[in-house]
């Protein structure tokens, strides 16, 4: 087993720190005493690519922080970017049968009518029920916390869809065309947000994060105390959806 | 009662086998069609992911283990009345689980990956446990039947019967646990579901056994001895009552929890499932059969006891439909305290209507079980033969 690397020796973290220092010159915007809204460029700085042939590191826990307060009503850029990136384009006669890897949810607080919008996708739980229930082990959690479906061993039983508390998974109901070669999908299999694992492994950001014009999403390593996401989570109140289930999601929300 | 002459009897056997075979073949054809086109041709979607095929499959699998109870009462609990019925009970169990598993497997999105399911095992998955439970069930029941049919093996019948009894309890625990081990949906996630599925299997299994047994007796121009009828109808009434008890407790406890009140109100009073629950499950599947089984004028007549058993079977389908489809139709409570809407049906009640291929696949499972039973009883001569003098002696000893 590889021992977790210390922050000083981790080149990826050093890279992020350097990137952060680089964009620091762009300046901080003070929004409250002791709290700085960092520039989008720093928050969404590229991560280090994973070298071919090396395994995902358990020292890393990839995660997302979504600021619902910044999520613009009616905006669907993250959804368009996700579905474009992953080749999710089918339009079936019954829209309930279409795949939706990410969706916008509108929340209305029953007590005061306050409205909030936010994107919802696979929450990349540390204790994912979908992984527990999958009979073949096709639903799996990568060492770096990304929850995936192995399209070669998924038998399409949909038990994971019964188990997911976030309705994050879709079943491919019809034959597919025009797939993105980097994101193989398959009729009869279950699928969900991969956190754009093919991009993350190349050192890029997930498509939804990159596309958000409001900078409402931060992607990064939750385990790295120097990462933008970890710093933000340490400084503002954030929420794990259905935290009562104790699933310890990698996706956190701010402002709900 | 008129007896069929051998030629007519043989003709009828072939007709029944052909009908069963045709229903099975059409079901398999429907599954191939779904495999080719995708589940787009079904009424299932990303909210209601399990539909009518699962209702039928789970009925068949639960009932398969329940029907074995008749054998267990003979072999394990030494009830003389049930011993001659054990072989038929074992055969029915194998036939029904075959039908149920066929439907489950043919409904898979990738039914062609059956070998993947057999060679990749996830120990934390209840489905994974079931992948082991089912084949062992086949093996144990087959050995049990062998010990009954082969005279040299008779001394081992009790041991084999005991193993079968334990395994069938484990198997139904596994089936109930498919739903018990779900944290996401309000309808499920209760430890009560495992024992409840066991008692459901007792009730439905005995009801199926009674109907099959009566049909076989009628076929052979015989009628069930009154003592046998009385014992079995009393047992059926007990099991139906027990299912009612579990149903009441499950809903009462669920309704007490504030977080589940909206779901219980939806299911029991404010949805298409309310009438299926009250009229289908409670009235047709529970109260009517209980009335028939306890009312003196009907309780002593084989016809009405069989009607009661058929109603209990019909009620089982209503119960599973309400439980499986109703449980999925209610939206997930992703943000407690908020009303939510989205393009993905969040916060909305879903409506399901089974498409023709699904209906055909579901009935195909019944067809497989029916065909296997028809062929099995003819080849293996599993008609229960009662020694009336022995029965009466046993009855007077226990009364």
Image (cartoon, coloured by chain):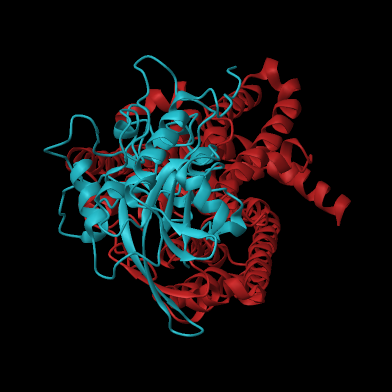
User: Number of marks in the image?
Assistant: 0
Residue A125 point in image, percent of width and height? 51, 45
Question: Which of the 4 image quarters holds residue B341?
Answer: bottom left
Image vertical order of residue A126 relative to residue B344, above or below: above
Residue at the spot 60% in from the left edge and 17% down from the top edge: A1
- Residue sitting at the far bottom: A112
Image vertical order of residue B251 relative to residue A181, above or below: below
Residue B143 point in image, percent of width and height? 61, 23
Task: Answer with left or right where residue B397 lies relative to residue A93.
Answer: right
Q: Which chain is red?
A: B
In the foreground, B216 or B203: B203
Question: Which of the 4 image quarters holds residue B372?
Answer: top left
Does the rendering let one see residue B222?
no
Q: Which chain is cyan?
A: A
Residue B248 point in image, percent of width and height? 65, 71
In the foreground, A62 or A46: A46
Residue at the spot 26% in from the left edge and 50% down from the top edge: A99
Task: Answer with left or right where residue B191 lies relative to residue B277.
Answer: right
**Quadrant in which the C terminus of chain B appears:** bottom right
Residue A18 point in image, percent of width and height? 41, 33
Image vertical order of residue B60 relative to residue B294, above or below: above
Residue at the spot 50% in from the left edge and 52% down from the top edge: A232
Residue at the spot 71% in from the left edge and 30% down from the top edge: B163
Does the rendering let one see residue B105?
yes
Image vertical order of residue B359 relative to residue B31, above or below: below
Task: Answer with left or right where residue A17 lies relative to residue B123.
Answer: left
Task: Answer with left or right where residue B304 lies relative to residue A123.
Answer: right
């Amino acid at each position: 087993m590889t021992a977790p690397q210390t922050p000083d020796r981790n080149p990826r973290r050093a890279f992020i720190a350097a990137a952060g220092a680089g964009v620091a010159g762009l300046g901080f915007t003070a929004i409250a005493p002791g709290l700085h809204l960092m520039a989008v460029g720093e928050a969404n700085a590229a991560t280090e690519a994973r070298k071919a042939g090396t395994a995902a590191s358990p020292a890393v826990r990839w995660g997302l922080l979504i600021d619902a307060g910044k999520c613009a009503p009616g905006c669907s850029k993250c959804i368009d970017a996700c579905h474009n990136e992953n080749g999710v384009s089918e339009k079936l006669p019954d829209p309930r049968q279409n795949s939706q890897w990410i969706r916008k949810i509108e929340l209305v607080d029953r007590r005061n009518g306050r409205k909030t919008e936010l994107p919802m996708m696979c929450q990349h739980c540390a204790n994912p029920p979908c992984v527990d229930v999958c009979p073949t082990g096709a639903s799996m959690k990568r060492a770096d916390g990304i929850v995936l479906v192995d399209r070669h061993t998924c038998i399409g039983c949909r038990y994971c869809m019964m188990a997911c508390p976030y309705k994050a998974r879709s079943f491919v109901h019809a034959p597919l065309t025009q797939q993105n070669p980097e994101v193989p999908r398959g009729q009869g299999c279950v699928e969900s947000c991969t956190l754009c694992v093919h991009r993350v492994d190349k050192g890029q950001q997930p498509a939804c994060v990159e596309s958000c014009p409001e900078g409402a999403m931060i992607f990064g390593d939750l385990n790295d105390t120097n990462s933008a996401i970890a710093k933000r989570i340490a400084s503002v109140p954030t929420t794990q959806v259905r935290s009562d289930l104790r699933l310890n999601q990698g996706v956190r929300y701010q402002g709900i | 009662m008129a007896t069929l002459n051998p030629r007519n009897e043989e003709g009828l056997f072939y007709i029944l086998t052909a009908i069963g075979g045709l229903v099975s073949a059409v079901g398999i054809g429907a599954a191939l069609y779904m495999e080719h086109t995708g589940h787009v041709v079904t009424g299932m979607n990303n909210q209601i992911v399990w539909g009518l095929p699962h209702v039928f499959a789970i009925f068949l699998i639960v009932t398969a283990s329940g029907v074995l109870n008749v054998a267990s009462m003979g072999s394990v609990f030494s009830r003389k009345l049930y011993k001659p019925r054990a072989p038929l009970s074992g055969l029915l169990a194998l036939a029904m689980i075959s039908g149920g598993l066929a439907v489950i497997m043919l409904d898979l999105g990738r039914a062609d990956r059956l070998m993947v399911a057999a060679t990749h095992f996830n120990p934390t998955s209840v489905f994974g446990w079931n992948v082991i439970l089912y084949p062992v069930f086949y093996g144990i029941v087959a050995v049990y039947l062998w010990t009954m049919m082969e005279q040299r093996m008779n001394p081992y019948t009790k041991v084999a019967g005991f193993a079968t009894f334990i395994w069938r309890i484990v198997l139904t625990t596994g089936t109930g646990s498919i739903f018990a081990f779900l944290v996401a949906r309000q309808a499920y996630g209760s430890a009560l579901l495992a024992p409840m599925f066991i008692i459901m299997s007792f009730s439905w299994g005995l009801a199926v056994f009674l109907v099959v047994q009566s049909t076989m007796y009628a076929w052979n121009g015989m009628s069930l001895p009154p003592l046998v009828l009385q014992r079995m109808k009393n047992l059926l009434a007990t099991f139906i009552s027990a299912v009612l008890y579990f149903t009441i407790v499950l809903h009462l406890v669920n309704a007490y929890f504030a977080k589940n009140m909206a779901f219980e109100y939806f299911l029991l009073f404010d949805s298409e499932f309310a009438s299926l629950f009250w009229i289908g499950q409670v009235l047709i599947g529970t109260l009517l059969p209980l009335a028939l089984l306890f009312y003196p004028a009907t309780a002593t007549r084989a016809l009405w006891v069989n009607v009661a058993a058929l109603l209990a079977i019909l009620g089982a389908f209503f119960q599973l439909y309400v439980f499986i489809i109703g449980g999925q139709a209610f939206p997930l409570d992703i943000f407690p305290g908020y009303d939510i809407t989205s393009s993905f049906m969040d916060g909305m009640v879903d409506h399901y209507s089974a498409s023709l291929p699904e209906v055909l696949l579901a009935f195909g499972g019944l067809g497989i079980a029916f065909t296997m039973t028809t062929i099995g009883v003819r080849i293996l001569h599993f008609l229960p033969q009662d020694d009336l003098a022995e029965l009466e002696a046993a009855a007077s000893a226990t009364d």
